Image (spheres, grey):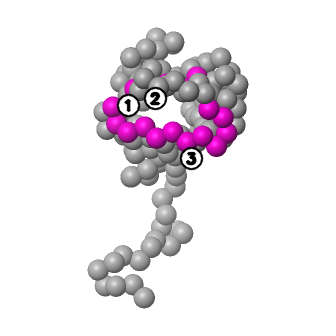
Amino acid sequence: MTRPEEKPPPSTSEVPSPRHRTVPKPWGREEWLVVGERIVMKKLFITAGYRLSLQYHEFKEEAWLVIAGRARLRRGETLAEAGPGRVVYLPPRTIHRIEAIEDLEILEVSTPELDDVVRLEDDFGRQDDAAP
């Protein structure tokens, strides 16, 4: 039984669509699996030899789970290689970059500030926007 001050969970028909879409990127692609008010979940597919921008976020928090492939990760001043099962947490203002040593698949879960990207370096000449 639900207490009067609690809202019952929504029925399946009331749950909003996750707004799934595929976004091509110069390094591969993103699949947006869930875009909610408080959370975003994406799958990143990064082609071997490519890397994302060296960047940070003012407010956005991210966590990455390497699903397949091998990556070179930069988190702050720390550089490491990672394979399947590795989890990386990125609090706001943490400088970071992912480079694919092999074709790479990463699950990214973040807060919803999709436009919060400050690029420090970019191999493709992009400026700050929502296209990391």
Tell me the distance, in whole angstroms, between the alpha carbons under discs 1 and 2.
Answer: 7 Å
Q: Secondary structure at mark 1?
A: loop
Q: Residues within 10 Å of mark 1 (few under 14, many from 20)?
A: some
Q: Secondary structure at mark 3?
A: strand
Q: Is residue 45 visible?
A: no
Pointer 1 or 3: first along the chain: 3
Note whether 102 is above or below 1 in the view shown: above
Q: Amino acid at mark 3?
A: Leu
Q: Amino acid at mark 1?
A: Thr
Q: Amino acid at mark 2?
A: Arg
Q: Is residue 43 left or right of residue 3?
A: right
Pointer 1 or 2: first along the chain: 2
Residue 117 picture location, percent across and down: 38, 28
Range drawn in magenta: 82-99
Q: Closest to the observer: 76 or 118?
A: 76
Tag 1–tag 2 contact (CB < 8 Å): yes
Q: Which residue is mark 1?
A: 94
Q: Residue at x 60, y 40 (%)?
A: 86
Tell me the distance, in whole angstroms, between the alpha carbons under discs 1 and 3.
Answer: 24 Å
Q: Secondary structure at mark 2?
A: strand
Q: Is residue 103 visible?
A: yes
Quarter of the image that includes the N terminus: bottom left
Magenta span contains residue 37: no
Q: Which residue is mark 3?
A: 33
Q: Is residue 97 left or right of residue 99?
A: left
Residue 122 picture location, percent across and down: 47, 15
